[in-house]
Image (cartoon, rainbow, N blue to C red):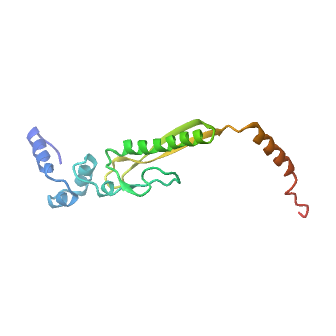
Amino acid sequence: MRIGSVSDAYSMYQSNFNIHTEEAAKQAGKSEAEIRQLKRTGSVECSTCANRMYQDGSDEMVSFKSAAHIDPAAAGNKVMAHEMEHVSNAYDEAEQNNGTVISASVQIHTAICPECGRTYVSGGTTTTQIKYNEDPYSQIAKARDGASLIGSRFNASV
C-alpha cells in the first residue's frame, strides 16, 4: 500500500490499531505480507513466539528443568540469569572440592522466528573450567599406580 499523504498514513495506522490476532487481520482483509509485517512489528501476536518453551538439558539443579514459556521481551535477561546459575554452581563445586574456577564463560544464542521473522533468544551455553588442588600424597599414589599399568594392556596375538 502506497501512502500518499499524512492522512493516508494515519488511516492505515487506525485500521491496524484494533488488530491483535492473525484471525482479526484476516477478517480485516489483510494480505499475508501485511500480516507478516504486523507480526514482525509486534502488532499481531505470533503463535510460534507465544508458544515457545525453554528447558534446561543439563544434569545440574537449576531453573527451567521442566519446560516453561518466557515472554520474548524478557527472554534475554531470564536466559542470562539461568546461565549464571550454572556459573554459581561451578564456583560452589570448586569451593566444596578444594578447587579453583579457572574460567567461566556464558554464550547467549539467538535465532530468527520462521513465522514472524523477529530475532529471539533461543538459549544459552555455559562453559566452566575448574582446577582441583590435589595433595602431594595422592599425586604420588597416581604416579605409582600409573607406572604399574604400563604394558598391562599389551596384546601379543595381533
- Residue 26 position (above or below residue 88): below
Residue 90 is situated, as x and y percent measured from the top left of the image, at 55, 42
Q: Quadrant of residue 129?
A: top right
- Picture residue at 62% right of the left edge, 42% below the top: 97
Residue found farthest to the bottom: 157
Q: Quadrant of the C terminus?
A: bottom right
- Picture residue at 91% right of the left edge, 61% below the top: 156
* Left or right position of 76 against 92: left
Nearest to the observer: residue 152 or residue 61: 61
Residue 25 is situated, as x and y percent measured from the top left of the image, at 18, 57
Nearest to the observer: residue 92 or residue 148: 92
Residue 135 is situated, as x and y percent measured from the top left of the image, at 73, 38
Nearest to the observer: residue 55 or residue 47: 55
- Picture residue at 25% right of the left edge, 48% below the top: 42
* Left or right position of 153 against 91: right
- How many numbered marks appear? 0
* Left or right position of 141 against 84: right
- Picture residue at 54% right of the left edge, 41% below the top: 92
Residue found farthest to the right: 156
Residue 44 is situated, as x and y percent measured from the top left of the image, at 23, 52
- Residue 53 position (above or below residue 146): below
Nearest to the observer: residue 124 or residue 91: 91
